[in-house]
Image (cartoon, rainbow, N blue to C red):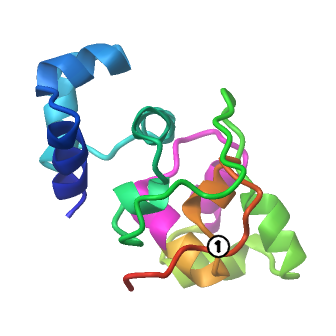
Amino acid sequence: MIMNRLKELRNKNNLYQKDFAKILGMSQSGYSQYETETTDIPTGILKNVAKYYHTSVDYILCLTDSKEAYKNSKIEDNNLNRLKEIREDKDLIQIEIAKIIGMSQNGYSQYETNTIDISTKVLKKLAIYYGVPIDYLLYLTDERKPHKRNV
């Protein structure tokens, strides 16, 4: 599903894979793996794709059909996320969230501390569970209300 959005956005901008890969600073074969969903897309790449196409990560990951970027969108060159903040706002502990998304507490803890990159599958689950845009989780917007969801 993701490959369709990446390919769609690339084609609408009259780009070949090699051209967009160069924009992202990577090889064509590496980028191709994102379009074919052979490899998970790192959050840094997701941010850059959203910025380039003026859209949201939610759109790229097929959580919405709205191509619009969220209001007050901002692309931060940081590796921060709001996972801990939003979990604590909901008065939850790590083990509870880890169970909800089907992983170990240690694995989830590494996402909160940015020790490892958050997988797109986990980003989608968390955004849906918390009822916020992925873009909010990744500090790309302060908008907490997602566009109309596909799921």
- Can you see residue 38? no
Give the quarter of the image for residue 24: top left
Amino acid type assigned to the residue bearing label 1 in the image:
Val
Q: Residue at x 72, y 60 (%)?
A: 83
* Closest to the observer, 17 or 99: 17
Write the start and end of the magenta stretch as one range.
105-124
Q: Is residue 42 magenta?
A: no
* Closest to the observer, 52 or 128: 52
Element type at mark 1: loop
Name the spot of residue 100 as percent of width and height, x first: 57, 84
Other-residue count near label 1 (Cα within 10 Å), few / some / many at <14 / 14–19 / ≥20: some
Q: Is residue 120 magenta?
A: yes
- What residue does disc 1 label? 132
* Closest to the observer, 42 or 58: 58
Name the spot of residue 55 as percent of width and height, x first: 46, 49
Q: Quadrant of the C terminus?
A: bottom left
Q: For this view, does 126 lie left or right of residue 79?
A: left
Above or below: residue 7 compared with residue 130: above
* Closest to the observer, 56 or 120: 56
Name the spot of residue 45 as percent of width and height, x first: 43, 34
Magenta stretch, overall SS: helix
Above or below: residue 38 compared with residue 135: above
Q: For this view, does 27 lie left or right of residue 108?
A: left
Q: Residue at x 35, y 43 (%)?
A: 41
Name the spot of residue 1 as percent of width and height, x first: 20, 64
Q: Residue at x 77, y 57 (%)?
A: 142
Above or below: residue 30 compared with residue 124: above
